[in-house]
Every structure is written in C-alpha cells, then in structure tokens.
Amino acid sequence: MNIAIITGASSGIGVEFFKEMQKEALDEVWVIARREQKLNEICEKYGKIKHRVLPMDITCAEKLKEFSSILDLEKPNIRFLFNNAGFGIHGDLDQADYVAQGKMVDLNVRALTEITTIALPYMTKGACIINTCSIASFVPNPRMTVYSATKAYVMSFTKSLRFELKKKKINVTAICPGPMTTEFLEVAGIDKGVSKAFDTLPYCNPEKTAKKGIRASKRGKCVYTPRGFYKFYRLLAKLLPHSLLLYASKT
C-alpha cells in the first residue's frame, strides 16, 4: 500500500499538500492534526483518493506509540512524509510564557524528529521527506527567537538526514517560505501593525509553494525557497555576517 502522511494537515500549506497528493499514484493519504472535524471537512472537500484521518497531538508520547503501532501492523510503503505541523510565537523572550515556548520546541523539533524516525523504516527508494521550514532558518529572527531556532534545527536536520539517506535514494527537502496568509499569523499573534517586517515583506502563495516544493523534492533538491526576494535573502545569509543581518530580520 503506497501512502502519503501529512502532519499539520488541517490548515494552511498542509491543506495544499493534501490537494497535491490527490494527483499522485497513491492508495491512501493519511492526514494528522488535532482537529478531527477540520480534517474531515478538508478530506470531504478535496479528497479524490482514499484517505485516513488520524486525529492526534503528535507531541503526546502515547499518540506517537499508537501511530507507530499502526505502521507496524499495516506496514505501508510511505512515498511522501510531510512534516508540516508547527507554530510560532511573536514577541520578546523576556516577556514570553515559558510553557508556550517549550511547546513550540516540542512540536517544531521533537515531534518532527520522532515522526520521521518512526516513519523511516517504511520508506524505500524514491520516497520523499518534506519538512516545512522557513526563511527564519537562514538568519535568527529577533522577537521570534525560539521559532527561528527551531527552524534552524529543521534545516540542519534536513541536510544531515538527506546525506544519510542518499544511499537509499530517499530525498529530504526543506521548504522555506516567507510569510503566508494562513492561521500561522493568528496563532503567532501577528496582527497588522504588530510587526513592521510582516507588514512590509512580500507574501508567499501557499498553493504555489506546496506545488513547487513537492516538485523540487522529486527532483532531489535539498532546499526550496519561493520568490526571488527570499532566494536573494538566502544568498545574503551565506555571504554576510548574521550580526549584520539581524537588524534586517528584526520582526
């Protein structure tokens, strides 16, 4: 049974990943998020091939055990794994809620790592792991300190795992968009006027980002960044000291 697995499938670019998977030669698409009703609505609206709704909080150890048990029982062939679940919080760390900051690390870092590790034994030649990363992985972002640190982890994780899996011909790609008009902004507390950067930066289209990101992964690319503006920013991050770019990246 050939399947795709999408975490964070209930909104934003996760929905676009689900829509794109309807074009693939798959037997099932498994969607994971906490909001079961939302997942069902998305599957009913966009699903053309068989799907499976797995409502779970992937930061919960017991839920991950259940997920591992399902894979062990059914032994599917995972063709695509989308590590899309994640969130950010805007604001200075010295005024932040430490519990929320810890939950961000749990979801963006630990859960992504564990889901990938659980899924890898069921992936074979030609499979793709696609990690939703961010331009925040290029340079640390003041006022989104923990978020940008988690995305730096995702970038490093992607590059190293991709190197490990070359012998198995499994590709790993980090998709690194700039701001998008999704629920991310609401959860992060970024309303209009709160952040000069978010008010002025060019926004990325979730549908195009998903489509082109998947295409890049199939072609064996390690990193996909939409829009020329952010491609140039990524280049600057390689050439200039981060101490200088921190001023430009202040959110």
Image (spheres, grey):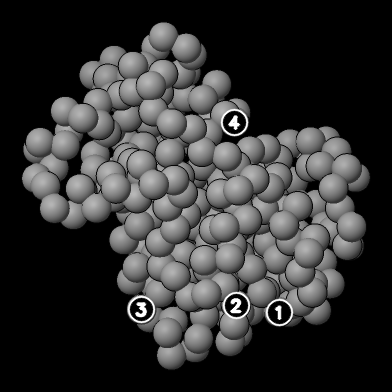
Q: In the rendering, at what x and y percent does residue 32 appear? A: 70, 50
In the image, is 189 to the left or to the right of 149? right
- Look at the image and tell me whether residue 74 can be seen: no
Residue extending furthest bottom?
167
Return the disc, 3 or 2, that comes first in the chain's sequence. Answer: 2
Q: Which residue is mark 2?
A: 127
Residue extending furthest top?
193
Return the disc, 2 or 4, that comes first in the chain's sequence. Answer: 2
What number is the disc on residue 77?
1
* Neighbourhood count class around disc 4 (C-alpha, 10 Å): few under 14, some 14–19, many 20 upward: few
Q: Amino acid at mark 4?
A: Thr
CA gap, disc 3 and disc 2: 14 Å
- Look at the image and tell me whether residue 38 can be seen: yes
Return the disc, 2 or 1, that comes first in the chain's sequence. Answer: 1
CA gap, disc 2 and disc 1: 9 Å
Q: Which residue is mark 4?
A: 182
Q: Amino acid at mark 1?
A: Asn
What number is the disc on residue 163?
3
Check whether the beta carbons of the residues at disc 2 and disc 1 lie within 8 A of each other.
Answer: yes
In the image, is 213 to the left or to the right of 24? left
Residue 166: name its quadrant: bottom left
